[in-house]
Image (cartoon, rainbow, N blue to C red):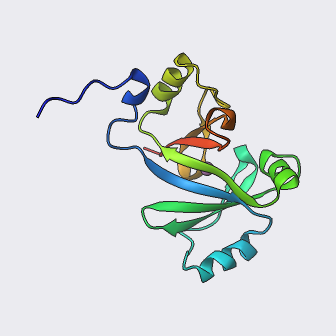
Amino acid sequence: MSAAPPLPAALEGLALGRLALDHVAIAVEDLDAAGAAYATLGLQPAGADETVADQGVRVRALSLGDTVLELMTPLGPGGPVARFLERRGPGLHHIALRVADLDTLLARLQGQGARLIDTRPRAGRAGSRIAFVHPAFTGGVLIELVEPAA
Ligand code: CO
């Protein structure tokens, strides 16, 4: 077998065998009501609910095989998820990809002209570091990049 061709620089950080679906996040009005609905589908909480102050949300993570489905509800009016609910109602909010080295990846994406919401990582759930890619760059879907806690 011949060696694999070199990857574009932007993909090197993703080419370590660690790129994975980290979670899918759904904006809801009521964590308990939504949680009960998903419980009927067999999805159970992966742990205690968590507040992510930086995003102004309370999050309930539901186990879903190798990944997680996150239910998010705003802590109050005015935050990004509250505005999302006002504009669009409950529904799919973002898809999160797990990456190994968020700083390096963000620098490479910027160098390649990717449209980012966050050019620097910020605090995510469970000690993770996250950054969002603009949905205008990704076919209308908000993509979160997640570097898990060490
Ligand atoms: Co997320």
Q: Residue at x 53, y 24 (%)?
A: 109
90 to the left or right of 12: right
Of the pair 144 and 50, the residue shown nearer to us: 144
Question: From this viewpoint, is residue 76 visible?
Answer: no
Q: How many marks?
A: 0
Q: Given the current orientation, which residue lies at the most extreme bottom position?
A: 40
Q: Residue at x 58, y 40 (%)?
A: 130
Quarter of the rendering containing residue 45: bottom right
Spot occupied by residue 79 in the image (x, y as percentages of width and height): 82, 46
Q: Residue at x 71, y 72 (%)?
A: 34
Quarter of the rendering containing residue 114: top right
Of the pair 141 and 150, the residue shown nearer to us: 141
Spot occupied by residue 28 in the image (x, y as percentages of width and height): 75, 63
In the image, residue 69 above or below residue 137: below
In the image, residue 121 above or below residue 33: above
Question: From this viewpoint, is residue 22 visible?
Answer: yes
Q: Given the current orientation, which residue lies at the most extreme left position?
A: 1
Spot occupied by residue 140 in the image (x, y as percentages of width and height): 68, 41
118 to the left or right of 12: right
Q: Quadrant of the N terminus?
A: top left
Q: Given the current orientation, which residue lies at the most extreme top position?
A: 111
Quarter of the rendering containing residue 13: top left
Spot occupied by residue 111 in the image (x, y as percentages of width and height): 53, 16
16 to the left or right of 126: left
Q: Quadrant of the C terminus?
A: top left
Q: Residue at x 58, y 19 (%)?
A: 113
